[in-house]
Amino acid sequence: DIINYTTLGKIRVDLVMGISYNADIRKAKEVLMKVMEAHPKVLKDPAPFVGVSELGDSSVNLAVRPHADPADYWDVYFDIYEQGKIALDDHNIEIPFPQVDVHMKN
């Protein structure tokens, strides 16, 4: 069954957070789940989700998906990005800068 949660007054907030290839994916997922579970405006049902969405050029990208009431969308969006970054930093989980290859000719 497909459930349209917006008709139930719930909206999914789609975020992407990249972590270093050297980072522990399981730990990063656990840290981000705790951030979402602790946020007062993140709904318990449907449950928040974190999963690997892409193996990017310079990072492992995690899909971070809390649900919220539509009126709380932007609060959840900005808070989870900020609190997620702080929590990853606190656990020494690196968010890498994009890697750029520069080739110089003489």
Image: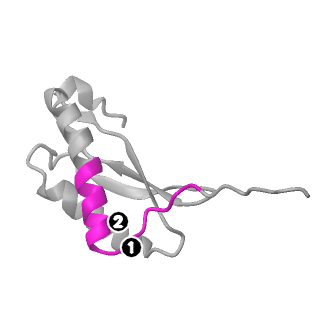
| Place of residue 51 in the rendered image (x, y in percent of width and height, measured from the top left) | 42, 58
Q: Residues within 10 Å of mark 1 (few under 14, many from 20)?
A: few
Quadrant position of residue 76: top left
Say which amino acid is labelled 2: Lys
Q: Secondary structure at mark 2?
A: helix
Going by the image, does 99 lie left or right of 25?
right
Q: Name which residue lies at 17% across and 27% down.
A: 9
Quadrant assignment for the N terminus:
top left
Q: Mark 1 sits on what residue?
A: 26
Q: Secondary structure at mark 1?
A: helix
Query: 11 or 24: nearer the eye?
Result: 24
Q: Nearer the viewer, residue 43 or 3?
A: 43
Amino acid on which the number 1 mark rests in the picture: Arg
Please tell me which residue is depicted at 26% across the width and 71% down the height of the picture.
90
Location of residue 71 in the rendering, given as x and y in whole percent from the top left corner: 14, 26
Q: Which residue is mark 2?
A: 29
Q: Residue at x 38, y 71 (%)?
A: 93
Describe residue 50's horizontal placement relative to residue 42 as left or right: right
Residue 61 placed where, x, y %?
49, 56
Q: Is 42 one of the magenta-colored residues?
A: no
Residue 6, image quadrant: top left
Residue farthest along the front direction in this orientation? 106
Quarter holding the C terminus is bottom right
Of residues 55 and 5, which is closer to you in this image? 55
Q: CA distance from mark 2 to mark 1?
A: 5 Å
Whole-percent x and y of residue 39? 13, 51
Along the line of sight, which residue is nearer the eye, 44 or 16? 16
Please state the extent of the stretch shown in magenta in the rendering: 81-98
Are circles 2 and 1 on residues that touch, CB within 8 Å?
Answer: yes
